[in-house]
Amino acid sequence: MIGADVLLLALGAVAVGAGALVVATRHLVRAGLWLVVCLGALAGDYLVLTAELVAWVQVLIYVGAVVVLLLFAVMLTRAPIGPSDDLDRPGWAAALVGAGSGLGLAVLLIDAFRWSRVDLPDAGTAERLGEQIFRSWVLPFEVLSVLLLAALVGAIVLSRPDIGRPAAPTPAAPSPAAPSPATGPPADGDRTGGERPVSAAPQADEGGRP
């Protein structure tokens, strides 16, 4: 085993560990940052395999675009970014599905190649990669771009609670109260809002005259 093999295994272990932390953490932003570490480790694996162009495409597209899109979607939807009890669920079902998928892929890979030696093709170039993307894989490439655009538009729509909801009815202004026919029109004191004046009784003088 040479140094390149050791480095490849170390970067693979970092990628697997960071991927496990992505699904294990309850902090949404930390999950996005662990995803950056996982994708960066994969880019390092591509560099060890002398696929420099694929490594930089990994960094530019996945680390620089997909993760940034994820963080922008979190901010636009005003989702809680701290620890959440909703994410603290039993993980035995996910662990069982992940272990079964990994075991199935390992069995499929071993059964397909056994222990035969596979000759690696020549190192790729930007010209060959462009031909494969824009000739053989142009439809999946465009579908992926439409999917990312739809995710961004969906995040914007979810961030606007007023879109798609009926407007609240405006309360009507209260009408002025009409005078009751039994009581008749208000008195002068009632019109002004004050009390009616009460006249004082005349007092008699010493002679008995008012």
Image: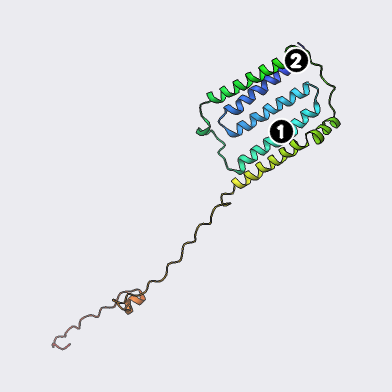
Q: Position of residue 61 (x, y in %)?
A: 74, 34
Q: Secondary structure at mark 1?
A: helix
Q: Is residue 24 above or below residue 151?
A: above
Does 83 sit left or right of 203 as displayed?
right
Q: Kindly indicate the quadrant of the structure image that contains residue 189.
A: bottom left
Quadrant the C terminus occupies: bottom left
Which residue occupies the foreground of this view, 94 or 32? 94
Query: In screen coordinates, is 195 left or right of 119?
Result: left
Q: Residue at x 77, y 21 (%)?
A: 48
Residue at x 78% of width, y 24% of height: 47
Give the left or right position of residue 132, taking residue 161 as reference: right
Residue assigned mark 1: 62
Count of all numbered marks drawn on residues in the image: 2
In which image quadrant can residue 56 be found? top right
Marker disc for residue 5: 2
Identity, as a three-letter code, of the amino acid under mark 1? Tyr
Sort mark 1 into few (<14), some (14-19) or many (20+) by Cα contacts within 10 Å: some
Would you call the spot at circle 2 few (<14 residues within 10 Å), some (14-19), or many (20 or more)?
A: few
Q: Is residue 156 above or below residue 65?
A: below
Q: Position of residue 185 (x, y in %)?
A: 33, 79
How far separated are the C-alphas under marks 2 and 1? 25 Å
